[in-house]
Image: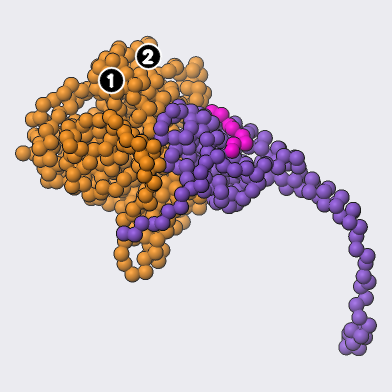
Amino acid sequence: MTARALILDAPAMQAQPWPRHVLSPETWTQMSRALITDTTLDLRAMWADTTHVHALLHDTEAADFLFASVPVETGLYAALSPARPGAAWFERMIRDLWGHHPADATDTRPWLDHGHWTATPPMAARPLPNLAAPEPAEFLTSVGDDLHHIAVGPVHAGIIEPGHFRFACSGETIVRLEVRLGYLHKGTLGLLRGKSPRVGARFAARLSGDSTVAHSTAFAHAAEAACATAAPPRAASLRAVMGELERIANHLGDIGAIAGDAVFPLLQSRFVWLREAMLRGCAAAFGHRQMMDAVIPGGVAQDLTQDGSTSIHDVLNTIQAEWPRLLALYDDTASLVDRMQTTGILDPTTAARFAPGGFVGRASGQAFDTRRNPGHAPYDRLDVAAAFSDAGDVDARVRVRLFEITESIRLLRILLDELPTGPIALTLPIVSAEGIGWAEGFRGDIWHWLRLEGGLVSHAFLCDPSWRQWPLLQAAIEGNIVADFPLCNKSFNCSYSGVDL
Amino acid sequence: MAWNALLRALRAGPATVALAPPDQADIDELSARLKASSLRKLGRSLAIRQVDSGSCNGCELEIQMTASVVYDLERFGLRFVASPRHADVLLVTGPVTRNMQDALLRTWQATPDPKWVVAIGDCAIDGGVFKGSPAILGGIDAALPVDLVIRGCPPTPAAIIAGLCALVEAHARPDTMPRTREPRTREPRTREPKAR
Ligand code: SF4
């Protein structure tokens, strides 16, 4: 039986928009084996609650989504990592937070739990006090003549988030990179429990600050799905406006930073200047530079200001006026392009095994975009054009993002011109139900799952796209020189806080 | 000719006469004046090391902006350095997660005295929205002595620069050297790497 058939045959629980199929441990084990040969199913997210482990799969052939769960009896469930390498980090996180052990997993080392928590596992029904002293982290080994190791972090040299990087190098060539994260674990999922969606939205907005609009939108979608309702059309359009603004601002900042890492300050300065213009436009239109807490379950917190539309159009005009010159500068600077091309190649075959979303995926042959599939209002009437490349290098990721900026500008103009009138928010009913929501952040597909009991969150998971992109950074860096690491890292720009939860 | 002149000079010994040592009172007065004026002039410069102790990265984005062409922090005598060993100021964001506590403390210990700690953003001040989570300490104050707080979620680049400029002003006054203090937390536990 195929994995798809095994999932669809299992009894379905009520969940929006897809029913949650609860597989018996035996069926789940069969499903995990079937996944090895069923390459059409991509793992998009994996998480747990106190009693079950959940997986969200995307059937690339049928172009639909499957939501599967397994009860965790005797603390064990069959791991998906032997079939889907991208599951390994999820499984380590599930083990640390809920205490469910993945049987036959490819990696059983702790992940978020560095041994400093007072009670473990923190999300379990009954956490136990942790009295043991923290153990030193265990790293993968690299064996070979003349290998040396470089350990960096958690506190890095720049103004970025903390994480620990272990490089095994032969001369200046990187043989293996291993990333250790978890330093930013703030217990966000635990804090969400017992909160109303309205209060919980503040945590979603702060899962990864650079994607605050996208995460807030995914969270709102999940809450609205659970309540079997949808935000008013004007709110949906305003969310999309904010989402596209956020995408442009982040792309501008990151492309600038990449140029900076390639020691080309001219381009960096121009891009950063445009980013600032963008943030000021956002502040003028929505009252906050990052538009934090502007998207709420049920709608948006406030309407576009009176001159908001004009200020956004002004910024878009500024960008478009300078755009051809910036693109020419990028293309004509041989020293810059030389650093970008063939650096940090993520080959499409490796990418396919992890199914990364966003520009990381789109630059390596993965076309997935939640604005098109599964889609949501107002994108279903917009026909989003997707950038696509299979070169997989730093240059390809930059070019995908350059394309996405122009596409977002196009979408914004339409959205602003066709802004529906009407209310900007509705009050969510008090329900006991579960829902999945999604949004396309600048990094890629974001998935949020909520279970509400009496209108309050009883379990939740917020999945950042970086879960499936970090491991690919480790793969893409192999064979590159240490000096190119900042460039490669910036071209992926994975979120630390987003996966540290 | 030249040889003769050289020989004569060598035989005669140095022409420079010895001077009486300066008066000790003069030295003391001059050094006090120098110290005050150098603090006033050179003290208007601070090296900053940023540390993320658990932020959502929103604050980092705005801190990065302060160093960009738009805000150009360096014109105020402030600059970011790559190592705490080169820093006068630790600019700390985040609510101090338990997983970052050791690294934050070690960074603080690596920063030479005198040093200042600036807490940036609402969650660095008291934990912000994350207050009450068992995974955090709840504000930089719970781990290190804090000299200045800059509010906001995140604070704007202008607000960050205004706060830092206030620090520069205070630094330029000779009577406001920071006290040398102890952090409020335990020593980081040193561990032996595990053999594999
Ligand atoms: S203060 Fe706000 S923006 Fe800054 S790190 Fe905390 S939650 Fe993020």
- Magenta stretch bounds: B145-152
Q: Position of residue B114 (x, y in %)?
A: 65, 46
Chain shown purple: that is: B
Q: Position of residue A223 (x, y in %)?
A: 30, 21
In the rendered structure, find residue A425 and report the number of the disc placed on it: 2
Question: Which residue does the image show at 40% across and 42% down from the upper left?
Answer: A116
How would you classify the magenta stretch by its main secondary structure?
Answer: loop
Say which residue label 1 marks. Answer: A452
Secondary structure beneath disc 1? strand
A105 sits to left or right of A394: left
Q: Residue A122: say if magenta.
A: no
Q: Which chain letter matches label 2?
A: A
Label 2 or label 1, whichever lies nearer to me, is 1
Is ligand 1 within 8 Å of the beta carbon of the residue shown at mark 2?
Answer: no
Q: Position of residue A370 (x, y in %)?
A: 28, 32
Quarter occupied by the C terminus of chain A: top left
- Identify the mark nearer the N-term, 2 or 1: 2
